[in-house]
Structures are given as C-alpha cells and as structure tokens.
Image (cartoon, rainbow, N blue to C red):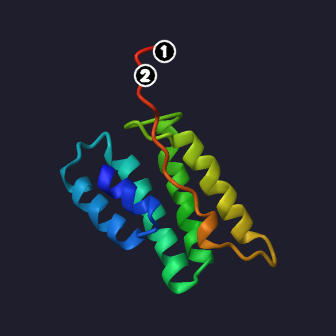
C-alpha cells in the first residue's frame, strides 16, 4: 500500500495502479471499495497525464469520491476527507471552461501522522 501511495505522489500513475491492483486482490471485502477509489484516481490521473484527456478522468474522479464516502475522515492512515476535497477541486477546475489543469495541481495522498496523544 505504501508503495502505491509513493508512486501516486511521484506521479507514476500507471505503476501505482498496478501495485494497488495486486493489493486489491488480497484485500478483505470491507476494504475493496476504498481501494477501488484509489485505483480509479490513479487511472484518472494517468489518462490525464499520458493522454491529455479531461472528461473521462473527471468522471472517474467523481466515481472515486462516491466510493470514499464511507471512509472519511481517514482510513488506513490516509487523510481521505482531505484527498476528496483536493480531488474534487481539481475535477471542478478541469471542468471549468477554458481552464488548463496541470500535472502539478494533481493532489497528493497524505497520511495521518502517528501520535501517542489524541
């Protein structure tokens, strides 16, 4: 999972997708919708980065957001709510007439910090 997140944050979306797919195959059923959302985000941003597509990736991002609904604010140490807000902002900007989304504006997956105190 960490490797998939690292690849995502390094903008290596194809490799991220492959790693997450293998993790998905072994995951329990309760985690699969969440992993499907991460895989969809990786696939969406790959389509944008490698093929300059916008409509398909935006649709895929919104589908991923639906999958993340039951996993907020955080799941598996991933700041899901923050990721959803950033991904939705990116998708809305990409949809805006005349906007030019860039690779540098693609959100990164952030993890919760470990703390002994709540």
Left or right for 27, reference 111: left
Q: Which residue, as the protein is rendered here, is positioned at the far left?
A: 26
Q: Position of residue 108 (x, y in %)?
A: 52, 55
**Count of number-bearing discs:** 2
Q: Position of residue 25 (x, y in %)?
A: 21, 56
Foreground residue among 4 and 104: 104
Residue at (65, 55) in percent of width and height: 88
Q: Which residue, as the protein is rendered here, is positioned at the far top?
A: 117
Mark 1 closeness class: few <14, some 14–19, many ≥20 residues within 10 Å: few
Q: Position of residue 15 (x, y in %)?
A: 33, 70
Q: Secondary structure at mark 2?
A: loop
Q: Secondary structure at mark 1?
A: loop
Disc 2 marks which residue? Answer: 115
Mark 2 closeness class: few <14, some 14–19, many ≥20 residues within 10 Å: few
Residue at (48, 35) in percent of width and height: 74
Residue at (58, 84) in percent of width and height: 52
Asked if 72 appears above or below 66 in the picture, the reply is above
Residue at (55, 52) in percent of width and height: 65
* Alpha-carbon span between mark 1 and mark 2: 7 Å
Residue 22: image quadrant is: bottom left
Q: Which residue, as the protein is rendered here, is positioned at the far right?
A: 97
Looking at the image, is mark 1 or mark 2 nearer the viewer? 2
Left or right for 7, reference 89: left
Left or right for 18, reference 76: left
Callout 1–callout 2 Cβ contact below 8 Å = yes
Q: Position of residue 89 (x, y in %)?
A: 69, 56
Which numbered circle lies on residue 118? 1
Which numbered circle lies on residue 91? none
Asked if 93 appears above or below 50 in the picture, the reply is above
């Amino acid at each position: 999972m960490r490797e998939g997140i690292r690849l995502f944050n390094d903008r290596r979306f194809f490799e991220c997708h492959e790693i997450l797919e293998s993790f998905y195959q072994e995951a329990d059923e309760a985690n699969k919708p969440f992993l499907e959302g991460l895989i969809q985000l990786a696939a969406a941003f790959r389509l944008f980065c490698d093929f300059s597509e916008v409509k398909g990736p935006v649709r895929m991002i919104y589908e991923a957001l639906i999958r993340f609904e039951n996993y907020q604010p955080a799941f598996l140490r991933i700041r899901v709510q923050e990721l959803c807000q950033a991904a939705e902002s990116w998708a809305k900007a990409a949809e805006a007439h005349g906007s030019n989304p860039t690779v540098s504006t693609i959100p990164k997956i952030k993890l919760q910090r470990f703390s002994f105190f709540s």
